[in-house]
Amino acid sequence: MRTLITNGTIVNADGSSRADVLIDGESIAAIGVDLPASGIGADETIDAFRKYVIPGGIDVHTHMELPFGGTFAKDTFETGTRAAAFGGTTTIVDFAVQSRGKSLRDGLDAWHAKAEGNAVIDYGFHMIMSDVNDATLAEMDELVAEGVPDFKLFTAYPGVFFSDDGAIFRAMQRTAHNGGLIMMHAENGLAIDVVAAEYAADGKTDPYYHGVVRYPIFEGEATNRVIRLAEAAGVPVYIVHLSARDALNEVRAARDRGAMAFAETCPQYLFLSLDDLGNGFEGAKFICSPPLRPKDHQEELWTGLRKDDLQVVSTDHCPFDFHEQKELGRGDFRKVPNGLPGVEDRVDLLHDGGVVAGRISRERWVEVCSAAPARMFGMAPRKGAIAVGADADIVVYDPERRHTISATTHHMNVDYSCYEGRSVQGGSDVVLSRGTVVVRDGAFTGRKGHGRFVKRAVSEAVRQN
Ligand code: URP
Ligand code: ZN
Ligand code: ZN
């Protein structure tokens, strides 16, 4: 099957140009001006006049079916990847979970079983490490060799995913030998629990207090600590879901002194704020960790994105219904499952609030949504660019089309939207996954099971700073 995309503007991270794209089978076969005039034919032609032709979005932080707080994130690999595709994302990297006392292998096998035959777009895995011991350290090497080269550890959630500094340092030391990457959830969870208990004892149990007790300085302190540990181990470190200026300052200072420190932020930290956690129990819809911050942190995160102190925007997609799931924490914010839906909205929110609002260029938009994730997570040159030989993961994107985000029209399996009623400019007209049209003009044309596991290489990009 050959597909020709004509008349569009190709937007890559390193520049834009008017050119046609020929897809042959699953990959991009040719790029050139006026390909039909040079006699190139195709089975299907997609007219991209006045549209962008961009590499499909890559969301390197999702949690399909994550167990949390006595329940599970509601999207499966089928519903979650379908929603991702509607939003112009053609690859996700989800977090497999090692349960305490079990092996990394058990966790990885479980996640393969969830995804295989269900995902509609390509997917990879990182591994959440809950125990660091001789056995799991040895397993890290095996996972790296199997294309799962990143490991998330937590300074938050004591008693659940928390690791102490010694455990984190041991895992980091191991990546110095096996080429893996440590991803850190950096908040001082022990200190947070002290403050949270004080507030709860005072009867301050509304969701709003979730955002109050997790001080920005607790994120800054943990971010500094894990970067310092990584420097001591001589390895790169990637800070996930960075939310606060205090943490950004630490990443910037580390990068300025030449440390291999990298970070992502998420749309919720760019567009939502502590105010959203108010309004009584409705605020539970916005409970995630780190929490939404006071509004004045937002512009600093945008500056961080412009200046490359933040390299990636992912979603941390982790949807829980408001009814029955978030409600588990009625009367105690500490019992609300942490996480927000967002895999469908990232590309459009970043286009609208970033490109249209004049905060970032359209090339930087492609960089943080696709090219950098591909490079930093061992998927380039197959993914992350419109280039000959790359997978034909392509979005024909209409930069003018407006739509209103709503739970009544979104495709994520969750009963609310954090962006309900927000009008955004920009939307995906046609989405192709390895040459197959999976979304066209608002209709799903893909297939459950089309998505394949992406065996990822160790990333050179994070070792070159
Ligand atoms: O609130 C969040 N972020 N939930 C998902 C788990 C995590 O920490 O990433
Ligand atoms: Zn986290
Ligand atoms: Zn997460």
Image (tube, helix red, strand yellow):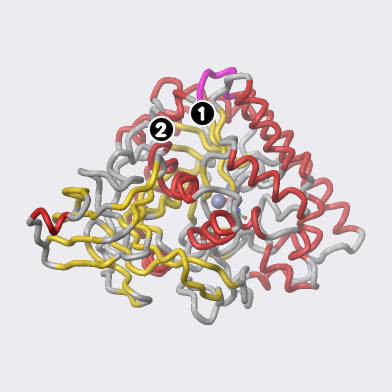
Q: Is mark 2 within 8 Å of ligand 2?
A: no
Res. 197 visible in picture: yes
- What residue is pinned by disc 2? 140
Q: Is mark 1 within 8 Å of ligand 2?
A: no
- Please say whether residue 212 is one of the residues in the magenta stretch: no
Q: Please state the horizontal and vertical placement of residue 241, each as a whole percent of the image.
A: 60, 47
Front one among 97 and 27: 27
Q: Residues within 10 Å of mark 1 (few under 14, many from 20)?
A: many
Q: Quadrant of residue 276?
A: bottom right
State whether residue 119 is above or below residue 177.
below
- Please say whether residue 231 is one of the residues in the magenta stretch: yes
Q: Please state the horizontal and vertical placement of residue 46, each as a whole percent of the image.
A: 24, 67
Q: Secondary structure at mark 2?
A: helix
Magenta-tinted stretch: 230-236
Front one among 252 and 114: 252
State whether residue 92 is above or below residue 244.
below
Q: Secondary structure at mark 1?
A: helix
Amino acid identity at mark 2: Met
Tell me the number on the disc at residue 171.
1
Q: Reading the chain from its start, which is encountered first: label 2 or label 1?
A: 2
